[in-house]
Amino acid sequence: MIKSMTAFAQAVFTFETITADVTIRSYNSRHLDIAFYCPEACQAFEEDIKKIIARLHARGRVEIRLHIQDTAGDLEQFEVDQIKAASYFHALQTLKKELNLTCDISLDQVLSVKNLIIPSKTQLDSQKLWKAILPAIEEASAQLDAMRKQEGRNLYGDLAARMDYIENSLSQVQELAGQIPGIYRDRLMERIARLTKDTDEIDPVRIAQEAAVLADKSDVSEEIIRLHSHIKQFREILDAPESEGKKLNFLIQEFNREFNTIGSKSGDARLSHAMVDLKSELEKIREQVQNIE
């Protein structure tokens, strides 16, 4: 089953007074790249959280954001930076004396100092913290996996339809390619007729040999056979139990190589136009494959 690398999930879990709010976003990436953003108190859990994510997700840029809220009453307490307050008040007194000011120094002036009053640093119980974080991380990771699978099913339908289109178009390409030897033969005969006008007739056996050489150079049967093989393999990868975006991306390169070869051998405008259309369709497939894990 193919999975998309683009998805979003969120989960919230509360244990006693601690609430963990987890959001996870994932994007395209060649490898598994996990970024973890959290409060300082949760940094000790980073490696464990990354292991949980890695169990379900093999590729993609995964960004995890964790927010913690504790409703315990003691978290509402604040503390004053006594040293900073005293130092600032002393500086105001010195300034007042040097400038001969008569005004009083107010509390508001002292409180204007940035970070003078700050929330108390309360040490959270790590066990309680983990009991709130773990269920939220597991739920969000499972949601992300479910969304990536759903997006993968959507991609599957689109890619399968586009592969059917390519396969059907190859029948037209094969038919047009079968006409190329005759086209080359007619062109050769026209050129020879112009060059040998009013001269002795050229040996028809020699003409047939030259036409055969040109026809062999324009033969695309091997490329078409390989393309049918690539189509079969592409479908097998789509139906495989594991998502294999890297293999599909490599296979797209093989498709493109065969299309280029057929285009270079093309001796007919209709065949050239057919190859342009197929390469355009292949580019759409390539864009979709970039999203697959």
Image (cartoon, rainbow, N blue to C red):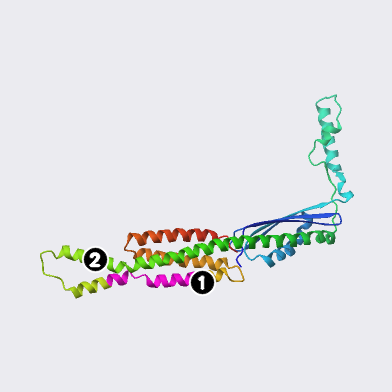
Residue 253: x %, y % from top left: 47, 65
Quadrant of the snapshot with the C terminus: bottom right
Residue 276: x %, y % from top left: 40, 59
Q: Nearer the viewer, residue 259 or 186?
A: 186
Do callouts 2 and 1 mark residues in contact (Cβ within 8 Å)? no
Q: Amino acid at mark 1?
A: Gln
Q: Secondary structure at mark 1?
A: helix
Q: Magenta segment range? A: 213-233
Q: Image check: 68 left or right of 249?
A: right
The answer to whether residue 4 is seen in the rendering is no
Q: Quadrant of residue 154?
A: bottom right
Q: Residue at horizontal 38%, vertical 68%? A: 174
Q: Nearer the viewer, residue 128 or 279?
A: 279
Q: Image check: 128 left or right of 48?
A: right
Residue 102: x %, y % from top left: 85, 24
Q: Residue at horizontal 86%, vertical 45%? A: 78
| Residue beneath disc 1 | 233
Q: Quadrant of residue 158?
A: bottom right
Q: Amino acid at mark 2?
A: Asp
Q: How many marks?
A: 2
Q: Earlier in the sequence, mark 2 or mark 1?
A: 2
Q: Image check: 278 left or right of 211?
A: right
Q: Label 2 to label 1, Cα distance in Å?
A: 39 Å
Quadrant of the snapshot with the N terminus: bottom right
Q: Secondary structure at mark 2?
A: helix
Q: Image check: 143 left or right of 182?
A: right
| Residue beneath disc 2 | 186
Q: Is residue 118 above or below residue 174?
A: above
Residue 246: x %, y % from top left: 55, 66
Q: Residues within 10 Å of mark 2 (few under 14, many from 20)?
A: few
